[in-house]
Image: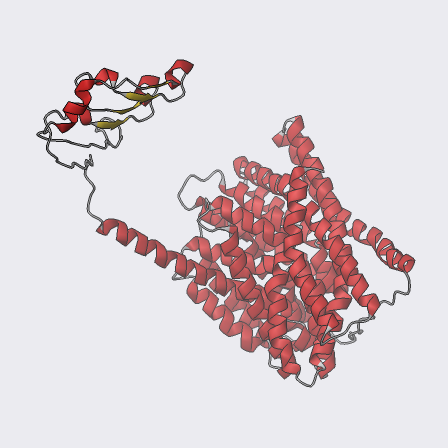
């Protein structure tokens, strides 16, 4: 097996095992699951692990490369009309094929599937154009976020409640495993032609703006569309009586998800081939690498979606329903937070974002730092979502203060952290949220007799909001530490050009008793470490340790024989014995 693929599968194993163990422990203790649901979950976890490994490797090899190449070529064309049309087309095509959106549309009773998908796709296309214009004209991201979120919350005052949660959830699920790698890389490509210091910062923020587009478009749809007639259909848990039926359940679903992924990948491939033929003209080995990466993406995403839809969705619904049905129903809040903390690690697009952040920032923002922030944010969001399900509090009471805080923080943290934070919100709310956490909330809402459309929906919106705050708080901490380090560096006294420690002692001849440490140089003679031994003839008493060089003889250890004058010389008084340690630094001897 490919070494890189083994590494990716191992990484996905580390990400999926914790949440699998949590579900297993819950299923064997306080919320016993039916055996068929548990078996489906375990097989789904295996599909998930292998699928994530293939997908993340494929995204590295193909999706990121395609997006960056296309973005660079579009910018170099310097034809604004072409770039606008291309960005809009990319946004619409990629979004319509996004598996997360398909999952959400299938669970939304208020709006027909295709109406919701087309509305969201147009919103993403328009805001991808705005994202490019921001990069081109160096518009400040925080001001754009303030303006558009103000419009969002003003519109929300006039929209039926059935549309509110769906609208905010649409903004989260749109930026999923297909959209995120492509859009992130497109941003990098669009900024490559800029040479100013803010170019790297502006490569982030595309996902943030593309997450606003669907919210606005669905809210506008709510003003003109009558949602009456839709009703929620409770999830039916599959029953498995034997192993053959188990494999038939997964095997019959896999072609459907393969078709969904093909629909997602083929337009991207066609778009890339068009640019390859007329503009890029990549070499054969580069083209082959991209095609193999697309194949890995196809395999990985098919396995992933089959696993989460067949295995994780019933398990999430069952656990949520039973936890909320306990006499101590508030236990669902801390347990939900525990599940949220670990489940974000299994989101495939999160790994892609974290890697790109670490690469762009040169390691200043590590993958571990990003993952910690996202995990804490996810835990907080799921805990608050469960409070909302149990109490029926309106989603707006959480979103308005949350977004006000997130936008306010953007004025105090470095611009890069703001862009990364708002990108993270869209990335964290991926397929694991749509296929496990949303059914988890639905199951809990059914148990307490709540309104599915207003109370259960909105969990994706909460998941998309909390990382905005957590990542920016990390930015504040990073900025504070950087300032402290800078202040400490300024406060230190200037070091001298040459540091010599001299220990004076009595002696007659200092030359024979100097310990010299030669620094490595081009000549092997410069690399000899000499230890002088007192004597009348120093040449006989020098022990030389030759450093390896072109001539192997230089590695010989020589020791001169002792003579009678040596003991006498050791008893003579010296005027001064100096031990000098030279620090090499160019011509100054540092």
Answer left or right for 361 relative to 531.
right
- Rendering coords of residue 136 (x, y %): 48, 45
Residue at 61% of width from left, 64% of height from top? 215
Looking at the rendered image, the quarter that the N terminus falls into is top right
Q: Is residue 545 visible?
A: yes
Q: Nearer the viewer, residue 355 or 114?
A: 355
Q: Quadrant of the C terminus?
A: top left
Task: Name the colouring of the figure.
Answer: secondary structure
Please tell me which residue is depicted at 59% across the width and 37% down the height of the picture.
69
Q: Position of residue 8 (x, y in %)?
A: 65, 46
Q: Pick the residue in front: 331 or 473.
A: 331
State the residue lying farthest toward the left: 575
Above or below — where is 527 with respect to 490? Answer: above
Residue placed most toward the observer, 20 or 356:
20
Work out whether 220 lies above or below 554.
below
- The image quarter containing residue 540 is top left
Q: Is residue 333 above or below residue 205?
A: below
**Residue 539 horizontal/vertical position (percent):** 23, 16
Q: Is residue 101 left or right of residue 488?
A: right
Q: Nearer the viewer, residue 111 or 264?
A: 264
Can you give x and y, in whole percent of width and height, for residue 80 in the image? 54, 42
> Going by the picture, which residue comes out furthest to the front?
564
Task: Tell me which corner region of the image, top left, top right, bottom left or bottom right, holds residue 199.
Answer: top left
Q: In the displayed structure, does residue 229 sit left or right of residue 209? A: right
């Amino acid at each position: 097996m490919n070494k890189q693929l083994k590494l990716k599968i191992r990484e996905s194993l580390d990400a999926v095992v914790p949440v699998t163990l949590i579900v297993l422990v819950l299923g064997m203790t306080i919320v016993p699951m039916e055996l068929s649901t548990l078996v489906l979950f375990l097989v789904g976890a295996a599909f998930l692990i292998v699928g994530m490994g293939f997908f993340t490797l494929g995204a590295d090899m193909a999706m990121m490369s395609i997006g960056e190449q296309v973005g660079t070529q579009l910018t170099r064309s310097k034809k604004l009309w072409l770039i606008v049309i291309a960005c809009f087309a990319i946004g619409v095509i990629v979004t319509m094929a996004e598996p997360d959106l398909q999952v959400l549309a299938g669970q939304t009773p208020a709006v027909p599937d295709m109406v919701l998908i087309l509305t969201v796709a147009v919103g993403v296309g328009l805001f991808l154009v705005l994202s490019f214009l921001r990069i081109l004209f160096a518009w400040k991201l925080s001001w754009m976020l303030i303006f558009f979120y103000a419009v969002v919350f003003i519109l929300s005052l006039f929209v039926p409640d059935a549309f509110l949660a769906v609208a905010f959830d649409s903004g989260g699920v749109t930026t999923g495993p297909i959209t995120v790698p492509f859009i992130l890389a497109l941003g990098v490509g669009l900024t490559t032609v800029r040479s100013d210091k803010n170019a790297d910062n502006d490569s982030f923020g595309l996902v943030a703006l593309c997450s606003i587009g669907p919210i606005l478009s669905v809210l506008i749809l709510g003003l003109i569309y009558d949602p009456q007639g839709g009703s929620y259909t409770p999830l039916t848990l599959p029953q498995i009586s034997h192993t053959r039926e188990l494999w038939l359940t997964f095997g019959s679903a896999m072609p459907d998800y393969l078709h969904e992924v093909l629909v997602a990948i083929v337009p991207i491939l066609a778009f890339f081939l068009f640019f390859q033929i007329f503009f890029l003209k990549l070499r054969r080995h580069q083209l082959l690498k991209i095609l193999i990466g697309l194949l890995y993406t196809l395999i990985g995403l098919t396995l992933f979606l089959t696993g989460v839809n067949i295995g994780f969705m019933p398990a999430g619904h069952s656990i949520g329903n039973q936890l909320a049905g306990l006499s101590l129903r508030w236990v669902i809040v801390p347990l939900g937070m525990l599940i949220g903390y670990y489940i974000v690690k299994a989101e495939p697009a999160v790994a892609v974002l974290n890697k790109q952040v670490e690469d762009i920032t040169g390691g200043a923002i590590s993958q571990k730092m990003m993952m910690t922030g996202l995990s804490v944010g996810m835990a907080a969001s799921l805990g608050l979502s469960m409070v909302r399900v149990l109490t029926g509090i309106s989603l707006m009471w959480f979103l308005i203060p949350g977004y006000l805080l997130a936008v306010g923080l953007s004025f105090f943290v470095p611009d890069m952290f703001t862009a990364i934070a708002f990108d993270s919100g869209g990335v964290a709310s991926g397929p694991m949220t749509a296929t496990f956490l949303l059914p988890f909330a639905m199951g809990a809402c059914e148990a307490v007799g709540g309104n599915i459309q207003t109370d259960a929906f909105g969990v994706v919106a909460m998941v998309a909001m909390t990382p905005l705050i957590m990542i920016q708080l990390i930015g504040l901490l990073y900025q504070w530490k950087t300032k402290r380090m800078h202040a400490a560096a300024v406060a230190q006294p200037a070091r001298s050009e040459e540091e010599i420690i001299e220990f004076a002692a009595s002696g007659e001849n200092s030359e024979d008793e100097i310990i010299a440490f030669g620094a490595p140089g081009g000549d092997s003679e410069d690399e000899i470490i000499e230890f002088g031994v007192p004597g009348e003839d120093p040449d006989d008493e020098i022990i030389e340790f030759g450093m390896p060089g072109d001539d192997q003889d230089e590695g010989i250890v020589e020791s001169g024989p002792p003579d009678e004058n040596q003991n006498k010389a050791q008893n003579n008084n010296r005027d001064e014995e100096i031990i000098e340690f030279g620090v090499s630094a160019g011509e100054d001897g540092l």
